[in-house]
Image (spheres, helix red, strand yellow):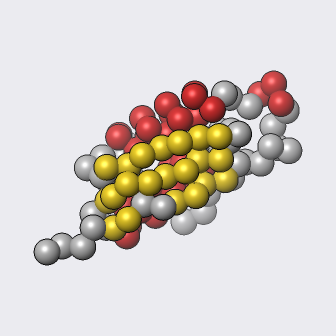
Amino acid sequence: MAWTMQQDRMSYTADDLPEAALPPDREVKSTVVHRLRENPYTADGHIRVAVSDGVVELGGTVSSLEARQVATEDAFTIPGVVEVHNEIEVLRAA
């Protein structure tokens, strides 16, 4: 499977899924971390992930603006994610 940047993405809100169907935050975090490690755009980054009530907070560093955008898009594709706050910094080449 080739990885590509998504131009359109699905996002979920708490109203879209019944309460019982929402995965726990720890499961969402695990899935986001796994997705970021597997994606070649973000695999080399140093990305921190925190999840609270379906809101994903991304921090750390990546090597390009494209990797930063992909991290946000990857997080949004995870069921149970209702919002993503991306505070990832892009390292500039020296």
Residue 74 x/y as whole percent: 50, 50
Q: Residue furthest top?
A: 20
Q: Is residue 23 left or right of residue 42?
A: right
Please say if 30 is above or below 91: above
Q: The C terminus lies in which quarter of the figure? A: bottom left
- Image point (74%, 31%), residue name: 22
Res. 51 visible in picture: yes
Please say if 58 is above or below 92: above
Please say if 66 is above or below 58: below
- Image point (37%, 61%), residue name: 67
Please say if 31 is above or below 14: above
The residue closer to the viewer here, 77 or 30, is 30
Res. 77 visible in picture: no
Residue 20 x/y as whole percent: 81, 25
Residue 60 x/y as whole percent: 37, 54
Q: Is residue 27 left or right of residue 44?
A: right
